[in-house]
Image (cartoon, rainbow, N blue to C red):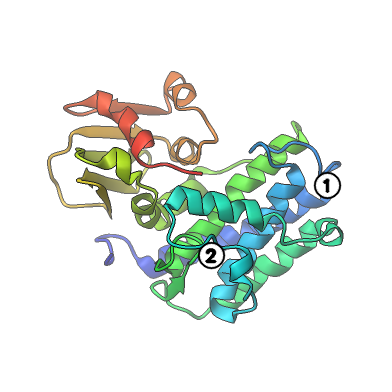
Amino acid sequence: MGAVAGVDPVAEHERTRAALRAVIPRLARLLRDVPDLDAPSGVPPWTVGDAGAHLCAAYLVYCSAFTHEFADWDSVLPPGDVPFTERITAVNAKSIGLLDADERRHLGDLVTERGERFLQVTRDLAPGTPVEAPWYGEQVVLTLATATGLMLSESLLHGLDIARGARRPRTPWTIGADEARLVIGQAMPAMMPLALDEAKAQGVRIAFDVVIKGGGPRLAVVVDGGTATVTRDAPPRAYDCRITAEPTAFLLISFRRTPLWTAIARGRIRAGGRKPWLALRLSELIVGP
């Protein structure tokens, strides 16, 4: 996907790196303060320790795309080119076993070490640098900009999962609107087509106009005949359904951290356009593990 008119890809990539750099110490403090790593996290059946271990594994494999320090892919990847959701579910299940009991006692240190290493080894690389991502599919290659956006997403969302499990009402885990915008703009245009449920999408032709309030980004999501394309800030066209959402609400709904109806009731997302009822189809067509 080429550069979007009005968006400086280098500047936005640097903002994403800065957001990731800022969230790493927040995660480290959170993990060091967790009183019980065996407490249920916000993503059952994982414990708080499982969520932290998965996050450490995610940092490791993204960094390894450049350093090749992780080579035991046979122990993690499912055999064959299985569907996206099955593949991610299998990889996630195995990722939490990559740390032993002693390493789990030092999750804060590992998050810091691996997160900072990713930022270091990618510091001088262009946003469009290719990143092989076999955990998403045998032939999947992302850009560094997308990979950095995904690392930010993993950090923010699993930080929320850990905080929910740790039950820290006095110091709640927050995901700011600007952080959510960066994830939506950098990661979701590449990931939404990968996450399409091809079986449900057969025979479906719907064009969604996804408008993120307060300055974008804006995504044209077109599902047609078992495939999906997502274009950021696309030229004007006819849409079947327009979805207008607050950035953090859209991020949490997309990754199944907040029920859609809760966001609707609170006015954080609404549907419009010629066929507003089709808005519900988006979360059915774009799936997650």
> From this viewpoint, is residue 246 visible?
yes
Name the amino acid, label 1: Asp
> Mark 2 = which residue?
17
Residue type, numbered disc 2: Arg
Q: For residue 238, which quarter of the picture?
A: top left
Q: In the image, residue 23 lies at what x, y percent?
A: 64, 55
Give the quadrant of the N terminus: bottom left
The residue closer to the viewer here, 44 or 94, is 94
Separation (CA) of disc 2 from disc 1? 25 Å
At x 49%, y 43%, the residue is 177
Label at residue 42 = none
Coordinates of residue 4 in the picture (x, y in percent): 27, 61
Give left or right: position of 228 versus 264.
Answer: left
Please, is residue 19 above or below residue 214 in the view?
Answer: below
| Front-most of residues 286 and 137 | 137
The residue that appears at 66% across and 36% down in the rendered structure is: 44
Rendered image: mark on residue 33: 1
The residue drawn where x is 13% and y is 44% is: 237
Q: Is residue 88 left or right of residue 274?
A: right
**Kind of element beneath mark 1:** helix
Which quarter of the figure has residue 3? bottom left
Q: Are marks 2 and 1 in contact (CB under 8 Å)?
A: no
Give the mark nearest the N terminus, 2 or 1: 2
